[in-house]
Image (cartoon, rainbow, N blue to C red):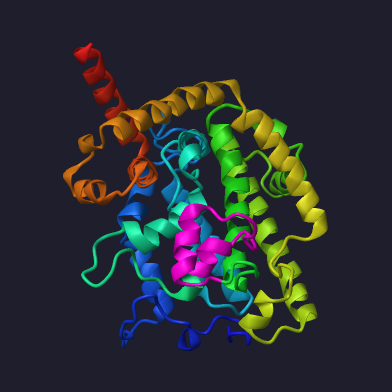
Amino acid sequence: MERAGFASDPSRARGRLVPEGESSFRSCFQRDRDRIIHASAFRRLKHKTQVFVEHEGDTYRTRLTHSIEVAQVARTISGALGLNPELTEAVALAHDLGHTPFGHTGEDALHAMMEPYGGFDHNAQAIRIVTRLERHYADFDGCNLTWECLEGIAKHNGPVTGDLPWALAECNAQFDLELSTHASAEAQVAALSDDIAYNNHDLLDGLRAGLFSDDEIARLPIVQDCFAEVDSRYPGLDSYRRRHEALRRVFGAMVSDVIETSSALLAESGAQTVEEIRHLGYPVIRFSDSLWDELSEIRTFLFNRMYRAPSVMKVRSEVGRVVEELFPIYLNDPWQMPKRWHSDIEAAPDDTSLARIVSDYIAGMTDRFALQDHARLARSERDTL
């Protein structure tokens, strides 16, 4: 499909914090995407919680599989709308890089520990990772992503106003991301694709975990019509195929709605350039009002029956304590961190800087490593008593 005038054009990208020569066979947004895929933080997502802690089962989504699903949806929508699929994909793949072990439970615990030192925010941490913490390249820290990709990571959920998370403020002071405006349409697609992916796959993971039944979700809006269509077309289909066929139709319904609604909004906006998209004052990538209302009912169901299920809450309580107990151990004796962190520790000018180094280290842990490290350090502390 031909690119729209409001698509992000790699030939007009605003550049990188550290200037580089261009590739002869990849656009700057393709290079961004590839650098994200090769980042250590991206690989670690394979052992980080989506909803269920990584060791609870091999078939549940992790942050990595979730990010891949988001990127697949985002690329499809982006192509259908005439946007730049490589930038969309890069933002989608990077959007969860800053997550701690144990998902939002780990983030809440780390934020509480970091409150005296500026707090913790996973979106801002993603920016910190791609601008500072990835240290593989000879010429720069981070991944030296384009302005457009950094903007998308920072603002994919909309303008960022008020008091900025410290990690985002540090980056913005170097490379003004114009945080008060909306992001490109590509970044907006990545944000909606996140909603599409988790609304669909959390239903499937909840079914696999036995938290609710096919019959229960078949009474939900959108899902009800999809099960009815499958039953009409494939009478007597076995339960696993029936479930899959219904949920893939739910997926398709959400994607089709975003494409149809956003196409109309983009046309009505009159925007001819990506800059005009940024300054419209409202998002142009959206669900229809009717589908949004139906999705709200699905989200309420998932919140009550999955995210707050007693079995999930029990594990959340246990893993939250892991982060709460790891933080003071490393803050009191940071030299227990691996040697590659020691130069940062030595250079830390004050307690806040040191706490932020400890936060970076813990946030980068996988579920598995955090559990193992906690068990090791807790045992070591007991042995010294």
Q: Is 25 left or right of 74, judged from the image as shown?
A: left
> Is 333 within the magenta?
no
Between residues 316 and 243, which one lies in front from this camera angle?
A: 316
Looking at the picture, tell me which residue is in the foreground, 305 or 123. Answer: 123
The quarter of the displayed image where residue 74 is located: bottom right
Residue 225, can we see it?
no
> Height in image: 160 above or below 46?
below
Check the picture and name the quadrant holding the N terminus.
bottom right
Residue at the left extreme, as displayed: 339
Q: Which of the 4 quarters of the picture holds residue 334?
A: top left
Please tell me which residue is depicted at 71% across the width and 31% down the height of the picture: 216
Q: Nearer the viewer, residue 214 or 303?
A: 303
Residue 266 drawn at (x, y percent): 73, 77
Residue 152 belongs to magenta span: yes
Does residue 54 appear in this view?
yes
Residue 346, image x, y percentages: 22, 47
Residue at 51 percent of width and 48 percent of height: 121
In this picture, is 339 found above or below 260?
above
What are the residue bounds of the magenta stretch? 150-177
Tell me which residue sits at (31%, 49%) in the image: 349
Give how far across and how far down residue 180 sits, in percent.
64, 67
